[in-house]
Amino acid sequence: MLNMIRMELYRMFRTKSFYVIGLVLTAAIVFTTHLAAVEMKSFTMEEKQEQYEYAMEQQGEESINIGMVVTVPTEPGAEISVFDLFYANLKGKFIALFIVIFTVLYSSADMTSGYIKNIAGQVKNRGYLVLAKAVSLFIYVGLMILFFAGVQAVSNAILFDSFVWGPWKAFLTYGGMQILLHFAYALIAMCITIVLRNNVISMLLVVCICMNVLTIVYSAIDNMIGRLGVKAFHVIDYTISGKIAFLPMEITVEEVRTTCFVAIAFWVVTLFIGEMVFRKRDI
């Protein structure tokens, strides 16, 4: 198992898309931070107040709009902190988009190249190859979010008049919870890729998930459950998309428990499906 993990890590770090996506993410973060700096300098106090109120409304909503919305939750008159932009980009699934795109490319690379045929017959349980991929993806997600935090910090230091980190304890707790949730997103993308074995369709599906297209399905299910007499139930509260979007900057102990429960549940389900399909499929 350790040899398979080392093999997957070696393959991951040798993948060109690993570095290309990192460069694109860096350019995107610098550009969006520049836009945020220009906006904060040009906005009037009333416009800053409107943006802040909109960000606060989004935190309290129990529904998500289709598309990707990144809103900075900075109080009027305050300096934008690294935590503010870190929170806004993770909440809006901007970083998740890069993660799932890489996951599809990475998960399908050995299947499309024929490499998997050379090693699948040498292992007792082909399901271990899926677990090895999952370990590599967990490391990738952690590195990606840490890399994003570093790029965001450097961008803030260069583009803003003053450098503000934000509360460290809340920053670390929020970042840790989002790593768990984004890893679940990566496993969903890996599972879809293994089951479909089609890069184009898999890429389209994971991008649609990041763009909250499934909220249409969630709303339909909520309506059906509501007709059965169950009130105030929202499916999205128990999905990875919902947890990523609704996770507040100040996380309580109860929110840590529910977030971990949802994330682990998705880990187990996606790994089970991916491993079962991979073991039984003729490759």
Image (cartoon, grey):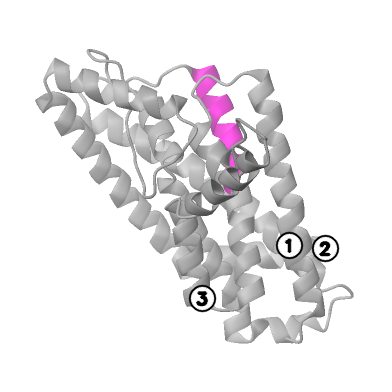
Number of residues whose C-alpha sits closer than 10 Å to that of mark 3, classed few (under 14), some (14–19) or many (20 or more): some
* Residue contact between numbered discs 2 and 1, judged by CB atoms under 8 Å: yes
Q: Residues within 10 Å of mark 2 (few under 14, many from 20)?
A: few
Nearest to the observer: residue 265 or residue 14: 265
**Residue 256 percent across, percent down from the top left:** 66, 27
Residue 104 % position (x, y): 54, 67
- Disc 1 is placed on an element classified as helix
Q: Earlier in the sequence, mark 2 or mark 1?
A: 2
Question: Which of disc 2 and disc 3 is earlier in sequence?
Answer: 2
User: Which residue does the image show at 55% across and 48% down from the upper left?
Assistant: 218
Q: Is residue 3 above or below residue 261?
A: below
- Name the residue rendered at 36%, 36% in the picture: 152
Q: Which mark is residue 1?
A: 2
117 over 88 or under it: above or below? below
| Residue 5 visible in the snapshot | no
Q: Position of residue 79 (x, y in %)?
A: 27, 18
State yes or no: discs 3 and 1 in contact (Cβ < 8 Å). no
The amino acid type, in three-letter code, at marker 1 is: Ala
Amino acid at pointer 3: Asn
Task: Name which residue type carries label 2.
Answer: Met
Judge depth for marks 3 and 2 and give the one in front: 3
Quadrant holding the C terminus? bottom right
- Quadrant of residue 121 within the rendered picture: bottom right
- Residue 227 visible at all: yes
Across and down, in percent, residue 243 comes to 57, 37
- The circle on residue 199 is 3
Residue contact at pointers 3 and 2, CB within 8 angstroms: no
User: Which disc, if any, is residue 132?
Assistant: 1
Is residue 22 on the magenta stretch? no
Which residues are the magenta region? 168-182
Quadrant for the N terminus in the image:
bottom right
